[in-house]
Image: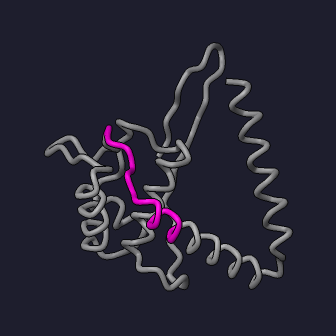
Amino acid sequence: MKRIGKTGDRIAVQSFAFRLDAHSGVPMYRQIIDQVRGGIASGLLVTGDQLPTMRQLAVDLAINPNTVVRAYRELELGGLLETHQGTGTFISTQKMNRADVERERQLTQIVGDCVSRAGAAGFTVDDLIEELRELAQSRRKGEERS
């Protein structure tokens, strides 16, 4: 999924793609939910962006359509998605609203998963921290140019 926006004389292209990990231990529907939330939090998905149809996403990810239906339904109930009959599913105008305890729990889980995967690939926590600092710095520079 790509969004092209013109900023002055530059054209910015952002893309968002779902990627599932069958070996993570996290249910597929939960991975879809987490990726949509992450896309919104990072700014890759913004209000009005259209998501793939449930059927198309199921085909693209080679998963059961009911898995996508469950993820989209939970995101709709949480106010993050809006489905319009005949036109599609879109990122809602509502903002994510989670209790601080839930946010902390989710961040702890994400960090733990990341550290585990990095460790299995031979990286240290210090390697991760350095990479996160570089990522944050490059994003700040990108925002300054906008």
In the displayed image of the protein, which residue is found farthest to the left?
A: 85
Q: How many marks?
A: 0
Question: Dividing the picture into quarters, in which one does residue 122 lie?
Answer: bottom right
Please, is residue 24 above or below residue 49 in the view? below
User: Residue drawn 46% across and 66% down?
Assistant: 101
Query: Where does the image place residue 23, in percent across and percent down from the top left?
Result: 54, 85
Query: Where does the image place residue 62, in percent across and percent down from the top left?
Result: 40, 73
Q: Quarter of the image containing the C terminus?
A: top right
Q: Is residue 47 left or right of residue 20?
A: left
Question: Dividing the picture into quarters, in which one does residue 76 lie?
Answer: bottom left
User: Residue drawn 24% across and 46% down?
Assistant: 82
Please, is residue 126 above or below residue 41 in the view? below
User: Residue drawn 51% across and 71% down?
Assistant: 105
Foreground of the two, 100 or 18 = 100
Foreground of the two, 86 or 7 = 7
Q: Is residue 26 magenta?
A: no
Q: Is residue 37 left or right of residue 12?
A: left
Query: Where does the image place residue 115, in percent across and percent down from the top left?
Result: 71, 76
Foreground of the two, 23 or 119 = 119
Q: Which residues are magenta?
A: 93-106
Query: Where does the image place residue 43, in percent across and percent down from the top left?
Result: 53, 42
User: Residue drawn 44% across and 56% down?
Assistant: 37
